[in-house]
Amino acid sequence: MACTNCSTGTTDGVPKGCNNNGSCGTGSCNKLTVFDWLANMSLPSGQEPFDCVEVRFKNGRKEFFRNTEKLSLSIGDIVATEASPGHDVGIISLAGELVKIQMKKKAVDHLGELPKVYRKASQKDIDIWSTARNKEETIKVKAREIAIALKLEMKISDVEVQGDNSKVTFYYTANERVDFRQLIKDFAREFSTRIEMKQVGFRQEAARLGGIGSCGRELCCSTWLTDFRSVNTAAARYQQLSLNPQKLAGQCGKLKCCLNYELDTYLDALKDFPSMDTKLHTDKGTAVCQKVDIFKELMWFSYENQSALWHVLTVSQVKEILAENKQSRKIAAIEDYAVEITKEIEKNFQNAVGQDSLTRFDKPKGKPNKNKKRRKPATINKKNAPKKE
């Protein structure tokens, strides 16, 4: 995920990079890029362009501003916007009629009171903004040292300095409530500016830091995922996954977001399955469900007094037995049904691994050829033989 500025101008094979850390002026460095599909369409006669714009700041923060000065703004322009206190500097991420749709999606009243865009950023504004962004890493390191000295159970994950260098926002994660009154005093004394603390979730922190998931690809939260839905262990149970915390947890320490991706498909497939609490009544005893294979539509049952011996049945066979039980009739044994399905499975089963030997790529060892003639021992020429003394 890089723009043309990041991928060109290499020196010794190392990309030059734009050093904007996700706020590239080209607007194509990150997942917050928006394609304006109305850009080439002209407005009907007599209609004025929408007077609100969407501005992107650091850490994925987006806010809406009113263009009261009727400036000619387009995606990628750097603007100075109203802030409290002073002003902030951001990049236009969306302009035009699509802003109205985005505001409706986020439940923002476009007729209400909104902060305004002051002007297009001048070179002086950009220089101050760049200087502020360059010192964020130093501030973050010093802030962590102060938090550790106060023995606070929190982690300062990122720092954002306002565009006019008048306020610093600290993003932190914590498991419990943190009393940081003394921390703010120390920060104000150390950095001589206004301090603001914002708590973020562990998923949002992982989205900003980025990384590679267990699938071998970039994290979804750092590339395209913008809304974080709650994930619980029930999603893993429905998908017949083992409840292993090391495998189900992502880099944020919470359950992986991808557990929700196929959950709806599994739930639709399970609608045709009898409940896991289903019991089959037979003359041999009561059988309970032990396992379900959603893709093959198979269910495994065992008798209550023989829990180690499982019998496989299809979903249609289970429904047939349940229909008999509903009419107060018992079948002889589930083995009668299990034998049929077992033969069918064995007939369709193909051992793909056993078709070829695992050592087929090994270099074969040569066998000695018994028919090969043995070499005769070398004979000494009597003429050249040494004489006996």
Image (spheres, rainbow, N blue to C red):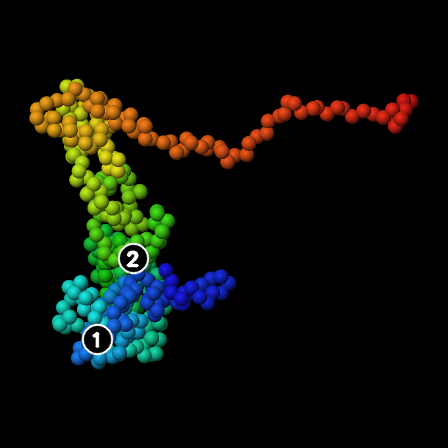
**What amino acid is labelled 2 in the image?**
Trp
Q: How crowded is mark 2: few (under 14 residues within 10 Å), some or many (20 or more)?
A: some
Residue 303, x across and y down, in percent: 19, 23
Residue 191, x across and y down, in percent: 30, 68
For the point 81% across and 24% down, the residue is 379
90 relative to 144, above or below = below
Q: Mark 2 points at which residue?
A: 224
Residue 279, x across and y down, in percent: 15, 28
309 relative to 230, above or below = above
Residue 24, image quadrant: bottom left
Give the left or right position of residue 387, taking residue 324 as reference: right
Q: Mark 1 points at which residue?
A: 43
Query: Is any atom of residue 338 visible in this view?
Result: yes
Mark closer to the chain start, 2 or 1? 1
Task: Judge depth for marks 2 and 1 and give the one in front.
Answer: 1
Total tally of numbered discs in the picture: 2
For the point 22% across and 31% down, the residue is 314
**What amino acid is labelled 1 in the image?**
Leu
Which residue sits furthest right?
389
200 relative to 386, above or below = below
Circle 2: element type: loop
Give the left or right position of residue 89, taking residue 354 as reference: left
